[in-house]
Image: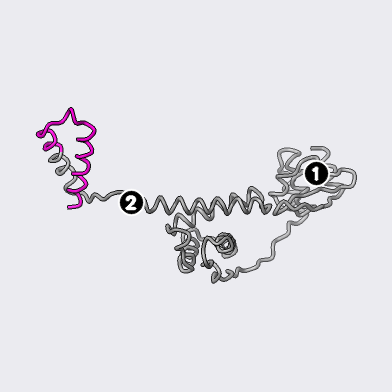
Amino acid sequence: RNNEKLIDEFVIGVINSMTDKLDENSIRNLKDTLYMQFMDYDIDKKSTELSICDNENYIVLKSFLSAKLIEGKSELTIQRYKEMLVMMLDRINKKYSDITTNDLRCYLVQYKSERNVQDSTLDGMRRIISSFFNWLSDEDYIVKSPALRLKRIKSEKKVKKVLTDEELETLKINCKCERDIAIIEILSSTGIRVSECSRLNISDIDFVNKEIIVRGKGNKQRKVYFGGRTLVHLQKY
């Protein structure tokens, strides 16, 4: 009966748009053809609920990301927030205000199972999700954040292996240009992050006092220092 009703509505629409071109026999033949074509299919009117839900989710997500940008989060951090939260919203497939603590727990469990990520990575996702829902609560989009009961995911802390002098020399020997040697020297002598190194400009380096102004997380600046060997390779580059 649902098929019949929808086909009738479709035919009425065709009749209204082609009044001068269809007689009664043509209309009957059109309906008969449609019944034959769709007799094995279940036809339903397209629901707009999902698109409305998606639209509302992404509107509040955009507001959240804008707020974080104003707070001073870097563009890289904003992009990571966006990727993680879009993935979460798409998978749970509910309006933000209907998402429960259990939805979030199930999502994190499934994500870990499917991607085989470390607990430290999973806890980073939990922090991003918590930040989003706590913001929604603070801004009165929702009454209470479902992420409040998401406990910190404990991960094993491993002692990072320090490269030996021999390993550092082997790296530099295998470099193909002076730029790569300079990068290794900066990283090993200052301990800055690779992402911080990639954002350095020449104007950030004080060659006289052997200092570098580094922009870290949250665009916070700090000074780091390097030795004479690093200075030689920097100047050469």
Q: CA distance from mark 1 to mark 2?
A: 56 Å
Report which quarter residue 164 is drawn in: bottom right
Whether residue 76 is situated above or below residue 178 in the rendered picture: below
Look at mark 2 in the image and give the residue it sits on.
47
**Is residue 47 rendered to the left or right of residue 100?**
left
**Is residue 4 rendered to the left or right of residue 170?**
left
Quadrant of the frame with the C terminus: top right
Q: Main secondary structure of the magenta part?
A: helix
Q: Amino acid at mark 2?
A: Ser
**Position in image of residue 91 (x %, y %):** 44, 57
Per the rendered image, the range of residues in magenta is: 1-30
Q: Pick whichever of labels 1 and 2 is earlier in the sequence.
A: 2
Q: Is residue 129 visible?
A: no
**Position in image of residue 211 (x %, y %):** 85, 48
**Is residue 74 rendered to the left or right of residue 91?**
right
Whether residue 215 is situated above or below residue 149 in the rendered picture: above
**Position in image of residue 210 (x %, y %):** 87, 47
Camera-nearest residue between 211 and 190 = 211
Camera-nearest residue between 154 and 100 = 100
Whether residue 172 is situated above or below residue 157 in the rendered picture: above
Q: Are marks 1 and 2 in contact (CB under 8 Å)?
A: no
The verdict on residue 99 being magenta is no
Camera-nearest residue between 232 and 28 = 28
Look at mark 1 in the image and give the residue it sits on.
204
Q: Is residue 104 visible?
A: yes
Q: Amino acid at mark 1?
A: Asp
* Circle 1 Cα neighbour tier, 10 Å, few/some/many (<14 / 14–19 / ≥20): some
Query: Disc 1 or disc 2, which is closer to the eye?
Result: 2
